Image: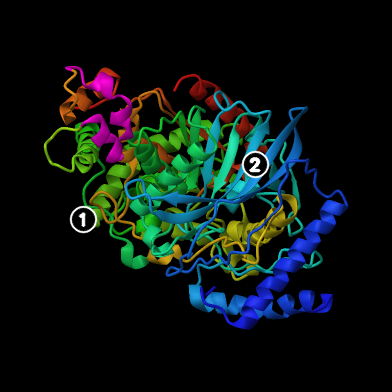
Amino acid sequence: MNWTAFTARPLRRAPLCWLFSAVLMGAAHLVPAASAAGADESKPLAPGPTLRDPWVPPESRRPSASPPTQGVALRTQVERKLRQAFEAADVDHLGTLTQKQASAGGLGFVARHFAEIDRGKTGKVRFEDVKRYLVEHGAQLE
Amino acid sequence: MQPSQSTSRRWLRSAVAVAACASSLLLVGCGGTDSSSNAATYFDPTQYSSNAAASLAQATELASTTHHQIVINGTTLAYHATAGHLTVSSPTTGAPEASIFYVAYILEPANATTRPLTFFYNGGPGSSTIWLHLGSFGPKRLVTGDPSTTAVSPFPLVDNAESLLDTTDLVFVDAVGTGFSEAVAPNTNLAYWGVDADGAIFRDFVVRYLAVNARAASPLFLFGESYGTTRSALLAFLLETAGVRLNGVILQSSILNYNSNCGVTGNAVVSCGGYVPSYGAIGAYYQLDVPNPTDAALPAFVAQMRALTISDYQPAVTQFLASGAVPNATLLDTLGNTTGLSAQKWGTNFNLGPDVYQPTLIAGILIGIYDARVSAPLLSPLAQSGDPSSSFITPSFANAIDGYLAVDLQYTTPSRYTPLSNALQVWTFAHDGLALPDVLPDLAAALALNPNLRVLSLNGYYDLATPFFQTETDLARLGVNANVQTTFYRAGHMTYLDDQARIAEKADLVQFYQRASARK
């Protein structure tokens, strides 16, 4: 091997590589105008396909028919999301979680504040206990 | 790039790698970097792929470490940069899911308990984090000359006098299938190309980063841009649920509800009212409004445009969408005078989206989407991508990153960094029962779990991608909340590219960090 091979091969290969990527990846892929090390500073870089953010493919443009939630509807939606997270951790479907179950179920918030949420010191908390704790700490829930 | 390679391709990559190593060794020899005794170069032999079906057979948690200095506000600060990967594992099974590439900038000497830590990411979805990494508040930035298009390219990379490194440690993270981030087998990149899966993998990355670097006690912040704000709202909820307490969420040019942005959904059923105040500001920039407000009067003029939109345009557009009712001539005249378009154009396109405003404001000219102050003649090279403001800066950003990582940060690899994957084409946008994501409820849920959480929404008056008034309207759903703050700049979507706006934004961010870091 020699230095000519190191430098000449990548530069010769590059345009093929871009074409390959462009065909494979579609128009959204950036086409590099030059290699990082080999950029020719005397020439302006050619513009390639560019980022469009936000953007959604035409077939996915299915906006919601309902108006955005706010007020009571939003607070109800928030409570539903919190309840879903609780129920996802409640794998036994008993309606209660121990600190260990909360931790294992990804509900670190409940595990972390377990002693404060479990007011009756029963070793188990219900979703309503979590909700009461949140409201007491300033959460806007229904 | 394909996971399986021919012998010649492999040889080519080794050749590039050897050459890259040789050049970095040369630079070290010449004193090109200021590495100290515990600096570590890293040659990463892994071949990363951004293909949907790609995955790594295995992953390692290795990184380069280099030491640097920067002057901010007249003070010389020492910091180290870490560039490499962390392996993110499933919180339930512990199985590796993805190898995530990141670059962290950490102030020295470090105080892990009081020093804020911020995770940065762009959006797309499918974009790497090059824009925030090399354009905003990192220790280096590319000099774009925004909104002019006369700067010589490639843009020079300079020390960033407005870096946030004096205020917070910075971690720039690349999504799966972008940069050098890739899924670990048996998972593929595609498995993380959806709103929920992407949010979860970012949560697990943050958890991993905090554990590996013993930063659980640090004040924590998220800084996402565009789709990155969609990710941030969900990620804030996921982190708070997981017991990771955040101090602040910074929303750079937001899209919190894809269902409310007519530039994304089309104008058949969704009102374009969120864009009308932006049209007012852009018309004023081009001196096309009648009467044209002075630059100093821009905030007051924009306030009038918000009021006009709420009181007149929005009711009329609701009727128009329901029944095709033609709005009255007085309103069309008012809209014409205040947006730079003719009353006649408003009459024929009453629910007027940015796709109509952008090519018709000035005859023969296409104005930018990301920064409407940037313009180019229709059919000129800069206009061909559909956004001259993006075309002008993209090649310089895409080409700067590989060399910066290899030479400045001593992370070398035979792979090429993927600035933008094709994830957007196949992304799963569905979230929480809707086909397009509305993450305002996720942000509200994060605020319910952590009422001390502070939110800062940064907006550009000349942004035609995520218009500021739509963002204000979306955030207003939260009700009155003193912890949610909104700021505006005379700039586009990437407000930080504008030299004046970046200074103002830095000052606002420093104040925000001071308020939000106080309690956790």
Residue B466: x %, y % from top left: 46, 48
Instruction: State the residue at coordinates (70%, 67%).
Output: B17
Residue A106: x %, y % from top left: 31, 40
Give the residue type at disc 2.
Gly
How busy is the neighbourhood of tag 2: few (under 14 within 10 Å), some, or many (20 plus)?
many
**SS of the residue under disc 1:** helix
If the image is split into quadrants, where does the C terminus of chain B sit? top left
Q: Nearer the viewer, mark 1 or mark 2?
A: 2
Instruction: State the residue at coordinates (42%, 54%).
Output: B96
- Residue at the spot of label 2: B138
Q: Which quadrant holds residue A80?
A: top left
Closest to the observer: A88 or B403?
A: A88
Q: CA distance from mark 1 to mark 2?
A: 51 Å
**SS of the residue under disc 2:** loop
Numbered range of the magenta stretch:
A98-120
- Residue at the spot of label 1: B323
